[in-house]
Amino acid sequence: MRHKAPLLVGIVAIPLAQLADVLVTILVGGAIEKVRLSDNQEWLTRTLVLMAAAAVSHAFFRFWQRWLVVVVSRRFEVELKQELFDRLTRLDLSFHAKSRSGDLVSRLTADVEALRMFLGPGMMYTLGAVVIVPISLGWLFFLNPLMSMSMLLPMLAVGVIMQRLTPRLHVHSTAVQESLADINHRAQEDFGGVRIVQGYQRQESQAQRFARSSEQNRDHQISLGRARGLTHAGIHGSFDLTFAVILILGGLAAIDRSLPVGELFQFVDLTIKVFWPLIAVGWIAGMYPRAVASAKRVQTLLDTRSALTETDSDVGLDPQKTPSFEFDSVSYTYPDADSPTLQEISFELPAGQSLGIVGPTGAGKTTLLLLMGRLVDPTNGVIKCNAIPVRDLPLAHVRGALGYVPQDSFLFSVPYGDNIRFGTDEDINPEQLAVLIEQVAMTGEVARFPKGTDTLVGERGVTLSGGQRQRTCIARALARKPRILVLDDCLSAVDTHTEKTLLQSLREAGQGRGVVIAAHRLSTVAGCNEILVLDDQGAMADKGTHKELVSRPGWYQQTWDRQQKRASLEDNTGAGA
Amino acid sequence: MSWEAEEEVAGKAWDGRLFRRLLRYAGPHRWLFIKSFMVLASLFALDLVGPWIWQASLDGPVQDALSSPEGTDTAPFIHDLLMLVAVYVGILLLQTWLRYFEVATLILTGQSVIHDLRRHIYSHISSLDLAWFDRRPTGALVTRVSSDVENLAELFTAGVVTLAFDMIRVVVVLALLFTIHAPLALVVTLMTPILILISLMFRGGARRAHRTVRAELARLNGYLAEVLQGIAVVQLFGREAHVGARFGEHLARYFAANKRTILLFALFFPIMSLAVYLIQGATLRQGVISIAGDELTIGAFLRFWLYLTLVVQPIRNLGERYNVLQSAFASAERVFEVLDTTSNLPTPSKPSPLGPEGIAPKVQFQNVSFGYLKDHPVLEKVDFEILPGQTVALVGATGAGKSTIVNLLLRFYDPSEGQVQVGERELTQVDLSDWRGRIGLVLQDDFLFAGTVRENILMDRSGIDEATLLLALKASGADRVVQNLAGGLDAEVAERGATFSTGERQLLAIARALAGQPDLVILDEATASVDSETEARIEQATGLLLQGRSALVVAHRLSTIQRADVILVLDGGRIIERGTHDELLAAKGAYARLHALQFELEA
């Protein structure tokens, strides 16, 4: 365990603070006894000075205990979160595909928090109780054994009640949290999709659904309130019972003259002081199962290794040269999926050549591109880069060669320029940035952003249109000066004019580089050296150059004819190619 | 950043006007409130009796026994003591019973109010016009029905009810202290302001510190969610270390913010106990002197000591309660700001009927001008009509105003000049739900809701039978998507439809529009991500399905609209050309140029 020193000091401060607190009670009790027995009050000043000293040291130690222990627990939280984050970003895509992102987020939030609460405040309060309870009880035992023993019973009841009721509290509070999340989710959807909700006049029915969620939340809250009421009553009831025991036994002993009144006072005051630490222990005990469950989940995640094994051979790729790629009967099935997404795909992509991938919606085009970047390993078959299986190459070399433009145009909520800079480790100066923005025909639009390239992207800044997002993603890929440009259907949301500009600059950027384009429109891939046609089962339907593919009957020829017919419909304007 | 600032406005700790408005929501639950008050009042009274019994025991039987000569029969003293103990136990049982209700009833009360309020706010928000939604991020709206409403509940429970009792408690107990021993009570009364001061000073710091922690945590978690969403991009770009470092920066800021909070709390608790010790020390000193002077009994001293705890606890909580009140009023302010907004689209008092469904009404735009912001017109004097059964297409560059025409047609907004007419009636005079109910809408950013695929297509519309549903699926080409789903139509849609590709989501959205057998179909860039084979199939099938119905089609790509009856070419918010495909090509204007450009790309 790191942070030993502050933690140890903090732990030592806990009993010292408690001792000082007990001392105050003993001093006050002593004073009550003395005032009854002695005639002068010369001792009073001494008692008050001692009390002041005890009070100051209590405050002093109490500060250090909280400061040191809780800060260490927060540091632990931060370090654990970083470790988990780094682990998560390095796990392969098949892991992410089968995990719900909400679950992964809760590993880093709810689970880490449960652990921190248990280790930080939990430990602080437990250690506090572990010290003050035996000391107080020991002292009281010394004063009057019988009475101190009989006090134990109601006190133990506090612990038992807390421990019994905490799981119930936990169940209800989890239900409350979930129903709250449900409310949030519904509101998010209905307000976010307000055009559809209002466009279909669904306000009434959505309001009814929302009311049901709200009702559920209310019911869970009320159940939680009942459980909390029981806990509250139980704890205070046992506490009051302890006082009743002190009153009857202490009163009898005082009448009997076997217990001085001053000591009776100590029983009362120390019981008050023991009360909260005891409740805290019960609370921690209730937290324990949850902390253990969280620790297990966190540990599982930390132990998860990427399914992509890193090679230890020293073969690499030349970062200056464009590599070739080869797929050798590659199949891929997503985890938990019934049928394969890709089946027996084979092709070669010689260095510097271009490859088009076409096929109906859902044919597996995106998956094929992800396989190239080795985000997942094929279920069957081998992918080779420069004739070396990619498994035997350093991951960073393979991915380093690619500039990828995703279909979903994912961008971060950071300044616009930083989204483009994200592509590379190299520094991009404002001039280079401007060139990249020019290449994707965004110069005019970026200039109109409130703060230019420093404008935040997302809800708190500018909301980019689909086409703007796609073009930004292309600029990000170009920033890498990639040796192979990978374009995943990235021009669907731009208008005709912009598309022309873009294709032009992509052609320029593609000089000497490899290009892989997945697309819906065949015209986008017609210029490629080779075109791969996938069918809706993810199998290879055909392969060849555009010329070859249009000349033989099949999906490609049909689709081409249809698209041609539309493009050249009764075209007599003389504005041909 | 402006709305963030709006979120964090520190409200007043008390606002009578807001409180009176909130009381209206409490009205229907007044019996619960009365019950809560009664429980708290009885508990407080019983709290005061306990220490009194201690005094009675010490000054009664115990003192009597100690002052009687040794060897006296103690039986009468014991009898007195047992009587007192019996009362004590009786009170104890009553208190324990009441304590259950102290918590349970208070929560029941608060939650009952919340539920009403939350439904009310939700319905109100969803009835507001789109212009209002456009100005606010969705997240801020969600807050209105979640954390703002939660805060308001605190106002009713932890806030007003408890705070009122805390104040009563302090005043009553201080007054009782004076009945025990005036000089001693004076000492305590003079010192309570110190406690109050510390508590209130801490309040300000704690609120600011907590706010920073919350903001940092939100950023941290937001970044985490974003990275997980874009994990493929992060890995393909080899940026794991980069995002790790950024996450580390967020963590460092979060940690620093936490340290400030911890420091505040680490200081608050010891300082508060020091102040309490100070009061106790002064009490002890004065008490010892008074006991020695026979002005105070030991029993009275003990009662005094126990009452002190009753004064200190509410003061210790004061700062926290103050913060609760403040954030509750800030939430109330925001919530009422929403409730006070009315839709900018007035509902007609006597809506005119549109005629029977199944017959498409004629749509007319007459000299329509519109801008989302003042002085920034998006549409200028737009004039066109969609005759029953016609297909009208809108083309033009991004920002030409195509989607705005769709927005006006749906009456998401009203034009600033000119009129939109349907069936020869002004749209503002038409029953909106009747009108929108006849439209099948497919938007550029398709949207799927949590629920099954079937629910997403039916959208709670009654009167869509299974045959119509299947027909719509087939016509849209979504049947193929559904076939591949485990569970078919009853498969659950994942978060924001993430399991579907963009193209598949568009097909489902088209199926949704067709299932309602609309009189008018609006396709706003509906097939941008669909392959051309599917697109052609959709076109064919919808052609059949839409016979006799009107359609408004917005597209970047000219190929999708060549069969339209009228094509409108928009530029800078004006219609610059109109006609059929052939007419426009022959005119050799903007459309012809656009077509040439596209042809060049395609061929």
Image (tube, rainbow, N blue to C red):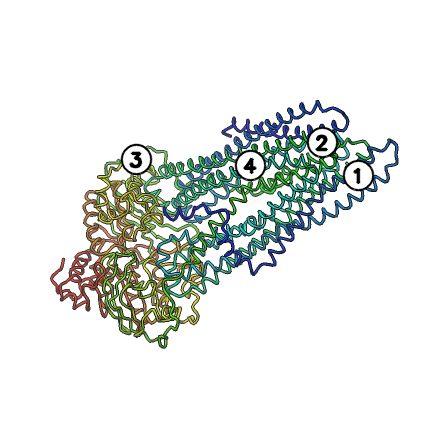
Foreground mark, 1 or 2? 2
Instruction: Give the Cα separation between the discs numbered 1 and 3.
Output: 95 Å
Mark 2, chain letter? B
- Note whether B138 is above or below B392 in the view shown: above
Query: Crowdedness of circle 2 by 10 Å Cα count: few (<14), some, many (20+)?
Result: some
Pointer 4 and pointer 1 on the same chain: no
Mark 4, chain letter? A
Q: Is residue B349 left or right of residue B30?
A: left
Instruction: Give the Cα separation between the discs numbered 4 and 3.
Output: 50 Å
Query: Crowdedness of circle 1 by 10 Å Cα count: few (<14), some, many (20+)?
Result: some
Q: Which residue is mark 4?
A: A121
Instruction: Give the Cα separation between the discs numbered 4 and 1.
Output: 44 Å
Foreground mark, 3 or 2? 2
Element type at mark 2: helix
Residue A172's x, y, as percent? 57, 51
Residue B257's x, y, as percent? 45, 37
Who is closer to the viewer here, A457 or B153?
Answer: B153
- Note whether A129 is above or below B512 in the view shown: above
Query: Crowdedness of circle 3 by 10 Å Cα count: few (<14), some, many (20+)?
Result: some
Q: Which residue is mark 3?
A: A316
Is the C-beta separation of discs 3 and 2 under 8 Å?
Answer: no
Residue A504's x, y, as percent? 18, 49
Who is closer to the viewer here, A294 or B551?
Answer: B551
What amino acid does circle 3 point to? Gly
- Residue at image location 29% in from the left, 63% down from the top: B416
Element type at mark 4: helix
What amino acid does circle 2 point to? Ser
Mark 1, chain letter? B
